[in-house]
Amino acid sequence: MTRVLGELIESIVQRFERLPERERRMTIILMVVLVVFVVGGSLFWFSASIATKNSQIKIVQKRLFEINSLKSQFQQAKQIADEQEKKFRSNDISLFSLIQNVATRYSLSLYDLNEKKDPVDQSNLIETSVVVNLKEVSVDRLTAFIAELEETEGGMVKVIRLKIKSRYDKSDLLDVQMTVATWKSA
């Protein structure tokens, strides 16, 4: 193999020496241009390849940063969910007692308390709700009543439906039907 390569190089050198001076210069110039073109093209190809890899690395780094950001958000959400689940497991609120105690503090008369228990879809929770009817209640007492219901027991009680009708005989008073709910583990 080296002998064949050596013979080829020797043949090229002999042919080059037989060329006239002008053609030798043109051949040398052509060879220099060819070498510059090959080296320049290789450098251009390598730099383009490096630029592509750098842009891909930046994209991956950006995604990694987003993943780390989402990881911390996920951990915070998981912690909140775990705390909520703990609250649901330890929830022993008696809605009847709570509603009656708060209504007594605001001198409200309760009518037709009806309790209902329903499982919550796609969870292991049971919603316990009570429909509360109030008659002839003022707006300020109603808002205070609702606020106290929702603030007690660590926010485990919520008014989930509220229907208000104004009275024709006493325009400053309201008739109210609301559904108060809490959630417990099944």
Image: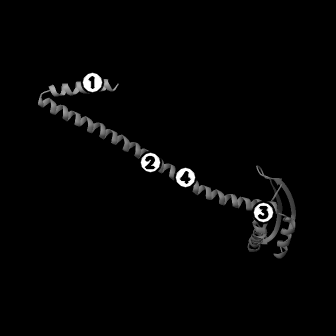
Residue 81 relative to residue 32: left or right: right
Q: Tag 2: residue type?
A: Ser
- Distance from Cα at disc 1 to Cα at disc 3: 90 Å
Q: Earlier in the sequence, mark 4 or mark 3?
A: 4
Residue in the foreground of this view, choosing between 14 and 93: 14
Residue 184 visible, this angle: yes
* Residue, disc 2: 55
Residue corresponding to mark 4: 64
Residue with the mark numbered 3:
87
In the image, is residue 32 above or below residue 83? above
The residue singled out by tag 1 in the image is 7
> Which quadrant is home to the C terminus?
bottom right
Q: Which of the marked residues, 1 or 3, is nearer the chain's N terminus? A: 1
Secondary structure under badge 3?
Answer: helix
Sequence-first disc among 1 and 2: 1
Spatial CA span between label 3 and label 2 = 48 Å
Q: Are marks 3 and 2 in contact (CB under 8 Å)?
A: no
Count up the numbered dots: 4
**Mark 4 to mark 2: distance in Å?**
14 Å
Nearest to viewer (mark 1 / mark 2)? 1
Label 4 and label 1: CA atoms lie apart by 58 Å
Tag 2 or tag 4, which sits nearer the N-term?
2
- x, y percent for residue 182: 80, 61
Depth check, front residue: 155 or 181:
155
- Name which residue lies at 34% across and 39% down: 42
Residue 55 placed where, x, y %? 44, 48
Question: Marks 1 and 3: which is nearer the front?
Answer: 1
| 21 displayed left or right of 151 | left
Q: Secondary structure at mark 2?
A: helix
